[in-house]
Amino acid sequence: MHKIVVAVTGASGSIYARLLLDKLIALKDQWQALSIVMTENAKEVWRTELDNDSYGKYTLPFFSQRDFNAPFASGSGKYDTMIIIPCSMGTLGRIATGISSDLITRAADVVLKERRKLICVVRDTPYNLVHIRNMETVTLAGGIICPATPSFYSRPKTIEEVAATVVDRVLDLAGLDISTFRWGGE
């Protein structure tokens, strides 16, 4: 059973966070704890992109960026997976340089030091050399960089289906058992 923290930053891509949370709730038999950290910028971007504040509908534990008493702020909390979706380049840069200035970067630091799974769903494009080097640093430290780049071989018909190709990949990377399009599958 997984213990998962989902962090939502202010990068564009709120649809990915919403779909991930919805799918994780549907997979509740595969995790024992699911917690959320959401920046104030993430809430504003969510309202702008999705035209609602439905992030407030989730009955999961929400933690403030300043709550260093959150269970996943320490390795003893035994959270095995952290998904940052979308992951801003500023957040990625702070993680890459070891700056634990808020709960998101502290939790990422904990996940990396404990050799657990950190998945950063970066959304910004194009990448500059600093972004690329930060992605390299996080990868070398054991993190997974999963750009929010959709696939199209499943022939998605709606924006939701396009975004779901990224979210399903993230769920695969997190080690959850999901039903999704598989290349060469039946």
Image (cartoon, rainbow, N blue to C red):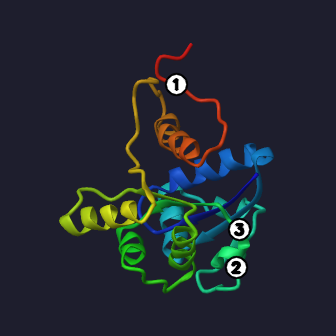
Q: Of the residues under marks 1 and 3, which one precedes in the sequence?
A: 3
Label 1 residue SS: loop
Label 3 residue SS: loop
Q: Are marks 1 and 3 in contact (CB under 8 Å)?
A: no
Against 141, is 101 above or below?
A: below
| Mark in the foreground, 1 or 3 | 3
How far is the residue under mark 1 from the one under mark 3? 31 Å
| Mark in the foreground, 3 or 2 | 3
Measuring from the top left, give residue 44's x and y in whole percent: 51, 70
Residue type, mark 3 in image: Lys
Residue 182: numbered disc: 1
Instruction: Classify residue 76 by image quadrant.
Output: bottom right
Q: Of the residues under marks 3 and 2, which one precedes in the sequence?
A: 2
Residue type, mark 2 in image: Ala
Label 2 residue SS: loop
The residue at which mark 3 appears reads as 78
The residue at which mark 2 appears reads as 70
Measuring from the top left, give residue 130's x and y in whole percent: 23, 69
How far is the residue under mark 3 from the one under mark 2? 12 Å
Q: Quadrant of the C terminus?
A: top right
- Looking at the picture, tell me which residue is in the foreground, 178 or 58: 178
Residue type, mark 1 in image: Arg
Q: Residue at x 33, y 59 (%)?
A: 124
User: Which residue is farthest left?
Assistant: 129
Q: Of the residues under marks 2 and 1, which one precedes in the sequence?
A: 2
How far is the residue under mark 2 from the one under mark 1? 37 Å
